[in-house]
Image (cartoon, grey):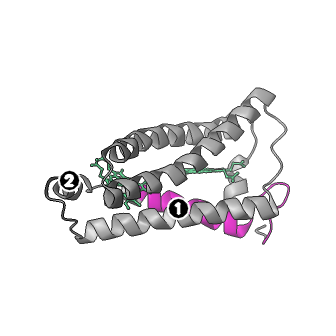
Amino acid sequence: MSAARPTPDSFSTTQKALHWAVVVLIALQYTLLEGMGRPYDQLVETGIARYPLTVILHIGVGATVLLLAIWRLVLRARHGVPAEPEAEPELFRKLGRLAHGAIYVLLFAFPISGAVAWFGGVGAAAEAHEIIKALLMALVVLHVGAVLVHQFVWKTNIARRMT
Ligand code: HEM
Ligand code: HEM
């Protein structure tokens, strides 16, 4: 059952919608919209920012991810999240909290570093943006792996909480 508020065993409808919207937007940034390298090199070389469609969409989608991440944290703070599943060892629950926290940090750091690189002309921020690209990818692989371990090893139907 979907609910306006999170229940003990499910995120709220809005929390779910936000989770999956961010997944789609991040996937777009990594695939169709990753062509920022050349426009960025041109900006660095000439000092002139050009705005072909890819650049406009990359910036727009990136800014949207930031807004949605803020919205998610507001909902988390106001309404909370489902209780942690009981079945797994305490160490893994700690690791889960840590991993989710790290993902949220990257959801902020990704667009902010991009904006500082593009609008602020800070080369180090562009490098940070690329490092974040690899870190987020690694965490998402871990995240999906953890969902599979919950599902098939600990037999906690965790996917249902977010679907
Ligand atoms: C969550 C949001 C974002 C994601 C997931 C994301 C993802 C990416 C990816 C995958 C690349 C390609 C990196 C590569 O060439 O290997 C990239 C490059 C870039 N992005 Fe983003 N981006 C986001 C937000 C933004 C924003 C808001 C801006 C600017 C306002 C921005 C500016 C740039 C720039 C300038 C580059 C080129 C960096 C370089 O070639 O050194 N990004 N981004
Ligand atoms: C860009 C990709 C993804 C990002 C950034 C992401 C991010 C997150 C974050 C931050 C949370 C914690 C929510 C909170 O407690 O506030 C979460 C939970 C969750 N995610 Fe993802 N996720 C991604 C992809 C996926 C995928 C592909 C799956 C499916 C296998 C998935 C399944 C889940 C589930 C089931 C939960 C709930 C965990 C729980 O009950 O505590 N996520 N995700």
Q: Amino acid at mark 2?
A: Val
Task: Tell me where residue 99 appears, x and y as whole percent.
Answer: 63, 39
**Quadrant in which the N terminus appears:** bottom right
Q: Secondary structure at mark 2?
A: helix
Which mark, by number, is residue 66?
A: 1
Picture layout, residue 95 above or below residue 143: above
Which mark, by number, is residue 162?
A: none
In the displayed structure image, the side of residue 153 where residue 70 appears, left or right = left
Q: Is mark 1 within 8 Å of ligand 1?
A: yes
Q: CA distance from mark 1 to mark 2?
A: 25 Å
The answer to whether residue 11 is seen in the rendering is no
Outermost residue to the left: 46
Ligand 1 found in image quarter: bottom left
Q: Amino acid at mark 1?
A: Leu
Q: Nearer the viewer, residue 105 or 95?
A: 105
At 57% from the left and 65% from the top, the residue drawn is 68
Give the overall secondary structure of the magenta segment.
Answer: helix
In the displayed structure image, the side of residue 60 where residue 69 appears, left or right = right
Task: Tell me where residue 78 appears, x and y as whole percent.
Answer: 79, 64
Asked where in the image residue 84 lies, by quadrant, the reply is top right
Q: Which residue is mark 2?
A: 44
Task: Tell me where residue 146 appears, x and y as whole percent.
Answer: 63, 37
At 68% from the left and 57% from the top, the residue drawn is 162
Asked where in the image residue 150 lies, by quadrant, the reply is top right
- The magenta stretch spans which residues? 4-27
Q: Is residue 87 magenta?
A: no
Q: Secondary structure at mark 1?
A: helix
Q: Residues within 10 Å of mark 1 (few under 14, many from 20)?
A: many
Q: Nearer the viewer, residue 125 or 75?
A: 125
Quick one: label 1 or label 2, which is nearer the N terminus?
Answer: 2
Q: Nearer the viewer, residue 96 or 62?
A: 62
Picture layout, residue 109 above or below residue 89: below
